[in-house]
């Protein structure tokens, strides 16, 4: 009997860390580019945010969470009922809206903020080329590097859209709410994402590559066996349940041995594109409200949190939420940097010790 056990190497982890880092860096750069350069004044802890309307932020967060729960539940329902065409139409519509429509407005905002003159026909032509190629690459066949690139672009544009339309407090409330929802949706028995993963594994299909980043899909070689070990187990045969006895000899029949082979194969990490979005949302909000040292701390802490999640996947051999660890560590570094690191740097800068 052959038993398979999945293991995860450093190369597997790096195939996920690279696109996550690229997505966060792209969002951070574009957040800076889409806002005109201004002189920032020092901020204390209670002055980190530009918007203080907590009631409005709460309503926006509740609306965002409600929309997310409804769309996730409807997507799982359509998948279990095999309404694949409805799901594909919804995903393609979102891809068109992000890669074509919102890309045009984002390019317009960047050019306006940086005072770069671009004619309307040129902008439309470039956006159509970028968006049209992206839709073909995501939903059809293309080179694996292009597919990776456009998956990252979809997540990055979603994060930029949320950053440009959500107040600062709403971003933090959304991050906390999404982390809690991720735990409920993945770990609870009736969680929609848990049901989705179980249904997909049972059917053995992968019909929607636009919503999952699979590390093995872009590896140069397929999964290979890393090591083999053989265990010998004694399994008595039913025909030898009784023991033959005689006056001169007690005979115990030999029991056959069956070999159990345990194979360790290189596992693949499947990371939802929503995880890319909220990692980048966290870093983009940090870029808008904090100094460079805090941005670097949050960037590194997100990657460290994602790295900590991998041993848990190895031990549990099941799907786990990928948002709580990275976002919790990033939030810890975000606020601790404002309490301890920034005052330290400011005081030494005033004394001309640090520049």
Image (tube, helix red, strand yellow):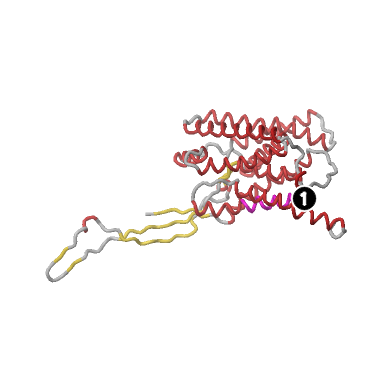
Observer-nearest of 86 and 149: 86
Label 1 belongs to which residue? 292
Observer-nearest of 345 and 97: 345
The correct choice, above or below, for 227 with respect to 152 in the image is below
Give the position of the C terminus as an image quadrant.
bottom right
Residue at 69 percent of width and 36 percent of height = 162
Residue at 56 percent of width and 56 percent of height = 9
Q: Secondary structure at mark 1?
A: helix
Q: Quadrant of residue 46?
A: top right
Q: Quadrant of residue 55?
A: top right
Give the position of the N terminus as an image quadrant.
bottom left
Residue at 49 percent of width and 42 percent of height = 188
Observer-nearest of 64 and 195: 64
Give the side of residue 77 with respect to residue 149, left or right.
Answer: left
Residue 203, x across and y down, in percent: 45, 39
Magenta span: chief secondary structure: helix
The correct choice, above or below, for 213 with respect to 4 in the image is above
Residue at the far left: name it.
247
Residue at the far bottom: name it.
248
Residue 101 counted in the magenta span:
no
Residue 332, x across and y down, in percent: 67, 51
Residue 322, x across and y down, in percent: 58, 46
Residue at 76 percent of width and 52 percent of height = 293
Q: Which residues are magenta?
A: 293-305
Give the side of residue 181 with respect to residue 3, left or right.
Answer: right
Give the side of residue 248 with respect to residue 330, left or right.
Answer: left
């Amino acid at each position: 009997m052959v038993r398979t056990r999945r293991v995860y190497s450093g190369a597997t982890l790096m195939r996920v860390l690279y696109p996550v880092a690229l997505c966060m860096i792209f969002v951070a750069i574009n957040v800076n580019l889409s806002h005109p350069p201004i002189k920032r004044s020092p901020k204390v802890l209670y002055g980190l945010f530009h918007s203080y309307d907590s009631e409005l932020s709460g309503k926006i967060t509740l609306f965002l969470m409600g929309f997310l729960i409804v769309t996730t539940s409807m997507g799982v329902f359509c998948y279990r009922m095999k309404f694949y065409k409805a799901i594909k139409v919804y995903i393609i519509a979102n891809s068109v809206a992000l890669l074509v429509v919102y890309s045009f407005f984002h390019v317009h905002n960047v050019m306006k903020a940086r005072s770069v003159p671009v004619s309307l026909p040129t902008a439309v032509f470039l956006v159509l080329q970028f968006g049209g190629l992206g839709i073909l690459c995501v939903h059809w066949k293309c080179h694996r590097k292009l597919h990776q690139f456009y998956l990252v672009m979809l997540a990055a544009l979603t994060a930029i859209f949320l950053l440009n339309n959500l107040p600062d407090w709403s971003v933090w409330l959304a991050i906390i709410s999404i982390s809690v929802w991720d735990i409920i949706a993945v770990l609870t028995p009736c969680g929609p994402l848990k049901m989705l993963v179980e249904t997909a594994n049972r059917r053995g299909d992968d019909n929607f590559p636009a919503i999952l980043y699979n590390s093995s899909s872009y590896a140069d070689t397929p999964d290979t066996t890393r090591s083999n070990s053989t265990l010998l187990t004694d399994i008595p045969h039913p025909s030898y349940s009784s023991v033959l006895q005689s006056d001169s000899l007690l005979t115990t029949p030999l029991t056959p041995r069956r070999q159990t082979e345990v194979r360790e194969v290189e596992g693949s990490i499947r990371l939802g594109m929503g995880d890319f979005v909220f990692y980048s949302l966290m870093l983009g909000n940090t870029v808008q409200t904090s100094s460079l040292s805090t941005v670097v701390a949050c960037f590194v802490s997100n990657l460290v949190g994602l790295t900590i999640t991998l041993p848990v996947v190895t031990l549990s051999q099941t799907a786990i939420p990928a948002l709580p660890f990275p976002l919790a560590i990033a939030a810890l570094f975000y606020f601790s940097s404002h309490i301890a690191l920034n005052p330290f740097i400011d005081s030494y800068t005033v004394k001309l010790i640090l520049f």
